[in-house]
Image (cartoon, grey):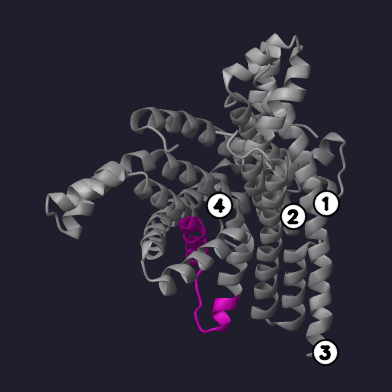
Amino acid sequence: MGQWAGYLQLILDGAVVTIKLTLMGSALALVMAFLAGLGRLSRFAPVRWLATAYIEFFRGTSIFVQLFWAYFVLPLFGFTLTPLQAGVLALGLNVGAYAAEVVRGAVKSIGKEQYEACTALNFNRWQGLRNVILPQAFVLMLPTFGNNAIELLKASAVVSLISLSDMTFQAQVVRAQTGSTLFPFLTILILYFAIACVISFAIRGLERHLTRGLDGIRS
Amino acid sequence: MEWDWAFVIQILPTLIEGAKITILATVLGYILAAIVGLAIAIVRRSKNKLISRPMGFVAEFIRGTPLLVQLYFIFYVLPDLGLTLSPLVAGVIGLGLHYGTYTAEVYRAGIDNVARGQWEAAKACNLNAWQTWTQVILPQALPPMIPALANYFIAMFKETPLLSAITVLELMNQARSIANYNYRYIEPITLVGAFFLVISLISVVGLRWLERRYGRID
């Protein structure tokens, strides 16, 4: 039992890296989602094109390829990234592209009367978006954002292949050192599932918090 | 670092070999996913909670954990339990199980979307269970599922590079071995990216057509 405690510690160190990666990647993804999602609804055609190109490119190529491209090809153009930076960049941009469509869908689903109300209150576009549209749209986005965050957590296992010592990488280390396969892989499967449960629990809590007092008002 | 077309032409045959395996793994994995998904959906509809609850938990567990780790699990743990699989077979099983949990949700939504009146009408017409499913429910439930199922087909196609981690010689693995051997990363990795982008953009057009043709699940 004593030796497993040491190996478990190794895997928990990896879990910290995985959680850090998930949080930083989600933060980048959130920023990109709003930039690209609102960009696609812009009045200016070039902004729409740019946002569409970003979304189609990152949804169209595999996360795995993007990560390898960021880690192996970008240095050849003079941008050298640490594995952590490459991982956060690839995960954030990839999941951000998926979440951008969520932002667009939620903003578009807000009824026309809300926009008319903004005009009636003499809000400019930014004020209307900030004070009327987004607070309603954000609640609609939340459940899907939670799923996106779990997708990001799952995709983060890929960074172990560019030698970042996340949970999956540490499990491989334990496998190499002990020859045991069931212990490391079963442990990390359970840990990944636990983190995914925490994410969906937190999102549900946040959703309850934001919709408090809105029963019967939201359709 | 310059882009070298001569090198591109030199490595293209190897990459095409890899692309064949990628496509094979996608097709086989998807067939398995379609079957597994149906099985999960049927078991989860069971009235017996002792059967449907554990199945639901297993499906949630598979969906909440990374495909890469599941592939490692199938490829490294099963041989210790006496079941040795070739890399490609392990990869196809991993893809099929993982995406089976997604297609199960599509089936479930599709079946739930058939109005209750249809079930009652089938009963009123004195149809038995088999007739109800094949002549009333499925003909209405299947068409709206098609775009969603196609969507997961594309998503799975983009996840096949993960199989390179369990030594399947698919496109990404061929590209990496070329890159490591020649110490040139820019062409092979970019070509793989371009390959996926082109196929995805074509399939987006195909998906739009399917959505127009068969309507979508709301």
Along the viewing direction, whichever of A15 and B5 lies nearer the viewer: A15
Q: Earlier in the sequence, mark 2 or mark 1?
A: 1
Locate residue A95 relative to residue B49 in the image: left or right. right
What secondary structure prevails in the magenta region?
helix
The residue singled out by tag 1 in the image is A83
Amino acid at dot 2: Val
Tell me, yes or no, whether dots 1 and 3 are on the same chain: yes
In this rendering, the answer to whether A40 lies above or below A69 is above
Position of the C terminus of chain A, as image quadrant, is top right
At 59% from the left edge and 36% from the top edge, which residue is drawn? A60
Question: How much space separates mark 4 and mark 2, taking CA atoms?
Answer: 16 Å
Marked residue chain, label 2: A
Tell me, yes or no, whether dots 2 and 1 are on the same chain: yes
Along the viewing direction, whichever of A183 and B135 lies nearer the viewer: B135
The residue singled out by tag 3 in the image is A2
Could you tell me if residue B102 is visible in this image?
Answer: yes
In this rendering, the answer to whether B150 lies above or below A173 is above
Locate residue B17 relative to residue B186 in the image: left or right. left
Disc 4 is placed on an element classified as helix
